[in-house]
Amino acid sequence: MLALACWAICGLPSSLAAADSTDQIRFAQVDAEAPVVLAGRDARHQLLVSRVSSAAQRDITHQVTYTTSPSDIVAVSDTGLVHPLATGEATVTARSEDGLSTSVQVVVTGFEVQQPVHFANQIVPIFTKLGCNGGGCHGKAAGQNGFKLSLLGFQPEDDYAGLVIESRGRRIFPTAPQHSLLLLKALNESPHGGGQRMQKDSHEYRLLRRWIAQGAPRGDPDAAHVTSINVFPPESTVTRGSHQQLRVTAVYSDGSREDITRTVQYECNDTAMANVDENGFVTVADLTGDFAVMARYQGLVSVYSGSVPLEMDTSAAIVDLPPPRNPIDEAINAKLARLNIPASPRCDDATFIRRVTLDLAGRLPTVEEARAFSADSSADKRDELIERLLDSPDYAQWFASKWMTILRNERKSTGYQYGTYAFARWIRRSLAENKPYDQFVRQIITATGHIDANPPVAWYRTVATRDERVEDAAQLFLGQRIQCARCHHHPFEKWSQTDYFQMAAFFSMVGTKPGSTPDQPALVSKVGMATARHPRTGKALQPVGLDAEPQEIAAAEDPRVVLADWMTNPDNPFFAKALVNRYWKHFFGRGIVDPEDDLRVTNPPSNVPLLEHLADEFVRSGYDLRALVRHICQSEAYQRSSEANAFNVRDEKSHSRFYPKRLTAEVMLDAIDDVLETDTKFAGMPAGTRAISLPDTGFDSYFLTVFGRPAAKTACECERTTESNLAQSLHLLNSSQMLAKLTDDGGRSARYAGESPNAKATETQLNELYLAALSRPPTASELSVSLQYLQDREDRRQAFEDLTWALINTKEFGFNH
């Protein structure tokens, strides 16, 4: 069934489009030969109308006037929704304010035939649309006020029993449908905690009443069911402050189609960019960027993507950028061109060495490194710096710290200490030798034996239950948060309880036997047929990967090996994308899909070609983590300045500039120690141990806690907080720990105070201090003010302490920019 007009491909403000008399403005149908067909009295159809000029198209569905001829066959609302009145044919005409018009034929069939209402296909979606079966109402586990529905209608057989059979059928009254408690509650004519959910003249009311009048039929169990839904348009370019009406079509198992625009649920992923109402009408904000609108219906999802380009004076000066260095830049620049957003220029050398050293090594550059990099005039010095950092022990240590946290390497008791240390060493060694990522994951998933011989066994010790294992494995290595599907169908994704327990079956044969201590059991894979029982049906489910085909697993075979084979297969649609997206967030502060471990259809990528390229390149490289890191860091996108221009200041996800990131807790503490030339002592660790070298999160440190160090209780990187807060500021400003570091007799300030106080030496000291903290020398103004401050103070050591304290409390120090 086709609409009156095609979607907006790009747009102009309505005032400009109307004013340009040289443009050929017309209304166009998608297919002029195909009429709109409405089959039965319950059918509806959303018309779409666009104004087309030589330069653009824009949606005006809600801005035209509709008339029908004859007038007794169909009715059309002001928003373009057509519904039947009688069997026959009619012409619907849309007319704009300035007299332009277009028409479409509408055919109504079967209006007089009383088709039985199908409960699962027609009634359950109403409860979902009205919010009745949501988690905050009757869809929660205990129901609401004695009435329970399945969450979002995923068990229609249970809903039918609850409505028609439970409580002696008191909720429906077939002989007088209008007096049914179900309708009276929804109209709020009978006291209802949820208030009024529908109007008496609404489509939903008429359909519910007719279903009750028919005797509340369950419907043919073999009737066609919805197999997919499609949102139209799938994508478009729209202008700031404009609108776009969407239409959604359901495709059934018998090939038939139905317009469900007013029945689906809509959600926008970025409400700062756009909002969508319950009827699929999108209102675009006055911002530049992109957004997505998710349409959900009976566990199925379809997505509309909208792009909002920048409207700017064509005479505006745009910075000339270096040509793309690799396909990363090509994908990002293509999006920037589509959005008409000019990018910031390449950052300077001081910014780059600080940025890449923090991101690759988890530390500040040394004074010597900063000086040497600034003095180096070779064209490829940035690439050489990346290689040096990748080859350094700091790279393996820093990324091991990241993996230790999300792999939940936590110390629960004293007896756990050996295992956490062993696992930490194994992770660090794996990264140092650049172990391919698929092997890294395989060795964790299939770990067996004792921790001393096979340290990845420690993961199973922390993730101790079957449910924790399947949920962590899916989230960590596949980017799929399937936790919800343990109890019910996932509300925002396609995963069902069957999907969940088929994955859980892979871990059903994991067992333990006594080890050297009670805290160090040995892990074994038991012999037998791996299964997991479905909690509702009781059916024994075989191990099957998400969206994968089942395969035979012998009783003597460890099912986790089959899981690892499926996970790491180059054709797996989740594995490579999950990793490259996680690493992208590490460098840019935001995933291409964000959150980085939530790669669901209803959370689309900000740049699809970019994610596809990174995943494909990662697979092609043999899952080489260093190659991935090198590829990202060599891109112009990564090397752009964080300084916004007049046009990209509000860009938050198109990568027209580098987005500053607050230093993580461990890096911040180490950076302060580097600048002050002090150490932080950690109980049980050798002197000089850096915060990023700690093997687990069990070390007591108020600094690390207040700056957001995660507790490693979940696999989610969201445990780590990078937001600034008052407690952090107060700690840096006046805590006893900071005072002790600043006044340390072996620290930088004490050393400077003990050196020659002549002007040239002092200037050298200040240059060194700025290089140590900010990887750049002081500006002329900063140098002048600092020299004057030192000259005016009698206590030279305290003056240096004050200057150092001031530097540490600047945003330039606390952020990677």
Image (cartoon, grey):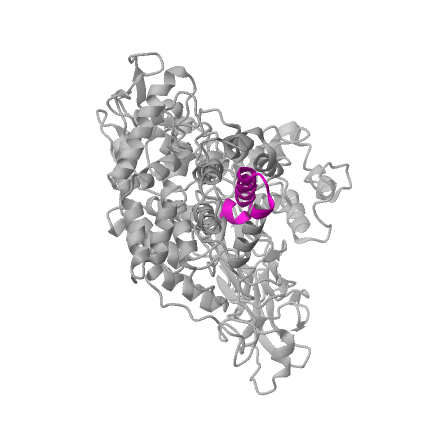
Q: Which of 48 and 71 is in front in this view?
A: 48
Residue 579 location in percent, x, y? Answer: 36, 44
Direction from residue 530 to residue 791 in the image, left or right: right
Q: Which residue is drawn at 68% across and 68% down?
A: 72
Q: Nearer the viewer, residue 516 or 657?
A: 657
Direction from residue 234 to residue 272 in the image, left or right: right
Q: Which of 486 and 680 is in front in this view?
A: 680
Q: Nearer the viewer, residue 18 or 322?
A: 322
Q: Is residue 3 above or below residue 430?
A: below
Is residue 50 highlighted in magenta?
Answer: no
Q: How many marks?
A: 0
Residue 485 location in percent, x, y? Answer: 47, 35
Residue 42 location in percent, x, y? Answer: 60, 55
Task: Write down the quadrant of residue 548 in the picture.
Answer: top left
Residue 752 location in percent, x, y? Answer: 46, 40
Magenta residues, dominant SS class: helix
Q: In this view, does 373 lie above or below 34?
A: above
Q: What stretch is highlighted in magenta?
A: 791-815
Q: Visible in this render: residue 1?
A: no
Is residue 801 highlighted in magenta?
Answer: yes
Direction from residue 46 to residue 345 in the image, left or right: left
Q: Visible in this render: residue 544?
A: yes
Task: Write down the quadrant of residue 545 in the picture.
Answer: top left
Direction from residue 277 to residue 302 in the image, left or right: left
